[in-house]
Amino acid sequence: MSNTQAMQPQQPDHAALAPDVQVVPREQFGHARVLVVGDVMLDRYWFGDVNRISPEAPVPVVHVQRQEDRLGGAANVARNAAALGAQAGLLCVVGHDEPGERIVALLGESHVHAHLERDPALPTTIKLRVLSRQQQLLRVDFENTPAHEALLAGLARFDALLPTHDVILMSDYAKGGLTHVTQMISKARAAGKAVLVDPKGDDWERYRGASVITPNRAELREVVGNWKSEEDLLARVTKLRTDLQVDALLLTRSEEGMTLFSGNGVLHTPTVAREVYDVSGAGDTVIATLAVALGAGLSLQEGVALANRAAGIVVGKLGTATVDYDELFQ
């Protein structure tokens, strides 16, 4: 089945149940070509022990003993797609600095094809987390907005990359990397590509025409307001989808699983998480798995079942982690 076919609505079935997860051949995932576009960051972790309180202020003193760097934001999404065996590309803007070089190195280690625009004046986004005994004590953010010239260069490169990818994935972290997202979605849909969006903020007009939007509960409330019931939620989402001409919306609901609203009706998939250790990055895993499934020719419903399974695995890991092919189908 082609990606375009996978996105076509069928007969409504409000009582549909999630299909059983079927094993997809590894080589089928290997044929999926996913281009991730968006805001990248370096997730930097400092691990240490706390044995005393500072004499300068009532705060713990952390004796840092180990540092670990991981890909964050859109880079983590691309890393998740690559971990499943897909051909993953990443289009983004980074700075000419040590964190930017570290991201380049980590992308190489993760087998992600990097298509990077460099902004000499941009400090690459860093999210520094300080942890002790597996508990996060503090997070420090370093970030700024890319220059207009770098974003225009990225738009031109997007045009060149579009024909060689099956699925386009927009990973928005509101850092400025998706300034031209509306144009990118329009071009991708005109080329017959499925476009998935992980949204941010309350202005979803910029995502008009996307194939699938994947908000969590807080992100959806920011746009449609608080809902009083499942019927009220359906009415609000249906109006939103109609207004924005979006094919489907996948609502991730943490411990309640996820719900797909589409032309097929409503499909609710209960969570399969055995142990919730850390939910950071779970949304990245969900949308990456869904993109790979669509790129491999699976239906949207089959992709949701796989994404739900992947989310149940990744929340049992610390920080922005991934799920590989063997874990997903073991």
Image: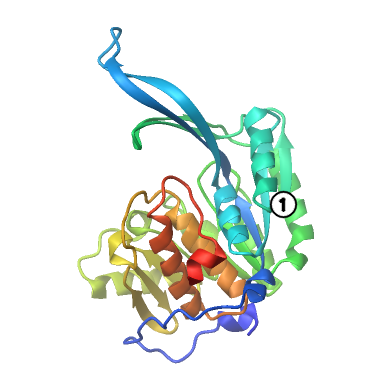
Q: Residue furthest bottom?
A: 11
Question: At x 73% / y 56%, what residue is drawn?
Answer: 158
Q: Residue at x 69, y 72 (%)?
A: 31
Residue depicted at x 77% and y 52%: 156
Residue 17: quarter of image? bottom left
Considering depth in this image, is 193 or 330 the residue closer to the camera?
Answer: 330
Residue found at the far right of this picture = 160
Q: Is 18 drawn above or below residue 309 in the view shown?
A: below
Q: Secondary structure at mark 1?
A: helix
Q: Position of residue 208 (x, y in %)?
A: 54, 64
Residue holding disc 1: 155
Colouring: rainbow
Residue 209 visible in image: no
**Callout 1 environment at 10 Å: few (<14), some (14 to 19), or many (20+)?**
many
**Residue 7 locus on image (x, y percent):** 55, 79
Can residue 55 be spotted in the picture?
yes
Please state which of residues 195 and 35 is positioned toward the viewer in this rendering: 35
The answer to whether 237 is drawn above or below residue 299 in the figure is above
Q: Mark 1: which amino acid? A: Leu
**In the picture, residue 164 is in which quadrant?**
bottom right
Residue 138: x, y in percent?
37, 29
Quick one: 56 or 211, which is closer to the camera?
56
